[in-house]
Image: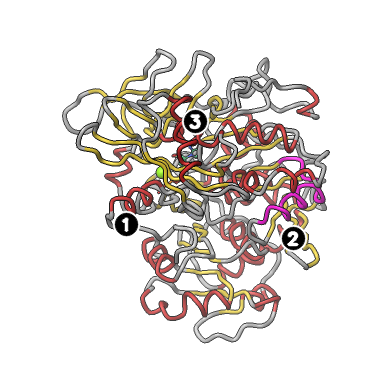
Amino acid sequence: MERDPVIRKTRADLRVPPNLRPDAIPADPWLESRRALEGLPGGGLNIAHEAVARHARGPAGDRIALRFVARGRAALELSYSELERRTARFANVLRALDVGRGERLFVLCGRIPELYVAVLGALRAGTVVTPLFSAFGPEPIATRINLGRGAVLVTTDELYRRKVRDWRPKMPSLRHVLLVGQDGAPVDEPGAHDLAALMAAAPDTFETVATGPEDPSLLHFTSGTTGTPKGAIHVHGAVVAHHASGLYALDLHPEDRYWCTADPGWVTGTSYGIVAPLLHGVTSLVDREEFDAQRWYELLADERITVWYTAPTAIRMLMKAGPELARAHAYPALRFVASVGEPLNPEAVWWGKEVLGLPIHDNWWQTETGGIMIANTPAYDIKPGSMGRPLPGIEAAIVEHLEAEGEPPRVRPIDTPGVEGELALRVGWPSMFRGYLDNEARYRKCFADGWYLSGDLAKRDADGAYWFVGRADDVIKSAGHLIGPFEVESVLMEHPAVAEAGVIGKPDPVVGEVVKAFVSLKTGHEAGESLRRELLAHARTRLGPAVAPKEIAFLPTLPRTRSGKIMRRLLKARELGLPEGDTSTLEGGS
Ligand code: ATP
Ligand code: MG
């Protein structure tokens, strides 16, 4: 269906005066956010102090910080002051175990309260945190703990028995394992501690360790979409960017009821599932269950969510389930919806507008950038398919690589709108990663001439909006054309039968690569020859013969990472019969 190229913002959509307006773009957002934060005596800065302790002592102390829900169980709520006491206890537990500042703690849990307490408590103690997906199998867990030389692991007794115990001798750095018993039951496991017992014995006050802005805070592994996940090192100073992006990209106001659907095993689930909402004193919903379309609509409606941050993969699954489920509820409280993680097809932005009553605001960032960099904000109309504009304080550019001998590489910004090139960011924003774990050479390669090079290809239009083209690794070269998979996938998604699409280049002796598409279908549609021909024709009409796929294959679902990204490298490896490479983050794998 042909649609308008722009969704205009109306006052009715926004409901509250937005934090960002085109006539009031802050000149120095970092300074403003630094001022809004408290800091520690002596110039220190600590993420957890700003997220929890700062509110606990003030008027927001009794406000609910985290509200945990699970199917069939009563909700559990933690106020800011309760979270402050629990994180103090946890920090004291680490101190009693002689866990030093800068040592690393891993968490491997579902979205239970203990996870949030451990992450924030460890940050207060100056301990560096790495959250893992609880669905990881034993090997990816052990590999990451060994790579990160983890000293402490917080997990449940059930996960420990199933995934860690047998591998423990192979994890020499691991000094302490802290176990959460099922439904609070005591834990009796040789070589491990009962976390609840240690917490009960620990004092509930703790003077936050005086970390500085450059002290390490989190070690986050990338999603592994393009290869083996990389460990990105982050610092406490990132809190300034989380505060600013919470304001400007998510439009958080203290009275919001916010829901970030990402698991803390992925950077979105910590930066925007834990830190940013707490910085703004909002109430965050944490759903302990996995995706379920009907339940998600119920939560949006019944929990009166006002700001919702989710991902394209979830939106596509909701679309796949059909509009009737969505229309069984009303969402009068909802006022801002955002998405991250993959390109958001224009069709999905429109779906939001038509089904939820609000367009979806796509935004772009990476594990490496630590926080949202480019976003559709309340300040500007939305061009569906665009990632939006650089946030205040962020200088972005499309750069071209110059021919240069050896290192360092040279790049030059392309000023002409509409030209594709590598998306780059001017070095110096507060949440920039400070290294790849044990890979200084790779880290250095990410920078040239004062720019951070993202590895993503994009273009900027004459209005300053950025458009994603594809990852540099995924771009298809066919008969002299450079084809970004996103454009082809978005056109396929316009077809009413298509739920998701993944496009690859398949080597071809004549044209270099031919475009091949893999699609999965919405409920109620049948794969078959006539649909295949219909999709090929649809794509050809919309894209022209040079860009349209030559081949289409149907799959029940597409392979994706646990953070929900389509793994085109796997589609390609399987198509060509090549080794699959690192599949540790593959959803459904182990
Ligand atoms: P790896 O680096 O291990 O291959 P990954 O890049 O998927 O994995 P993340 O850091 O979780 O790991 O994801 C960042 C990437 O996700 C970006 O570089 C980009 O390719 C993609 N991405 C995120 N948001 C968007 C968006 N709004 N539009 C398009 N792509 C996006
Ligand atoms: Mg990446």
Magenta stretch prevailing secondary structure: helix
Q: Look at label 1 and name its amino acid.
A: Gly
Q: Look at label 2 and name its amino acid.
A: Val
Q: Mark 3 or mark 2, which is nearer the start of the sequence?
A: 2
Q: Position of residue 86 (x, y in %)?
A: 69, 64
User: Residue beneath label 1, please?
Assistant: 581
Whether 75 is among the magenta residues is no
| Vertical side of 543 occupied by 247: above or below | below
Q: Mark 1 or mark 2, which is nearer the start of the sequence?
A: 2
- Tell me whether the residue at label 2 lies in contact with that at label 3, contact meaning CB atoms closer than 8 angstroms: no
Chain part drawn in magenta: 292-307
User: Residue beneath label 3, please?
Assistant: 538
| Vertical side of 470 occupied by 27: above or below | above
Q: Position of residue 351 (x, y in %)?
A: 66, 35
Label 1 Cα crowd, 10 Å radius (few <14 / some 14-19 / many 20+): few
Q: Nearer the viewer, mark 2 or mark 1?
A: 1
Helix, strand or loop under label 1: loop
Q: Which mark is residue 184?
A: none
Q: Position of residue 362 (x, y in %)?
A: 58, 34
What's the distance in space between the residues labelled 2 and 1, CA to CA? 37 Å
What's the distance in space between the residues labelled 2 and 3, CA to CA? 43 Å
User: Residue beneath label 2, please?
Assistant: 69
- Determine the residue located farthest toward the front in the rendered image: 530
Picture quadrant where residue 294 is located:
bottom right
Q: Residue at x 46, y 41 (%)?
A: 532
Question: Is residue 528 visible in the rendered structure shown here?
Answer: yes
Looking at this view, is 396 or 329 the one in front? Answer: 329
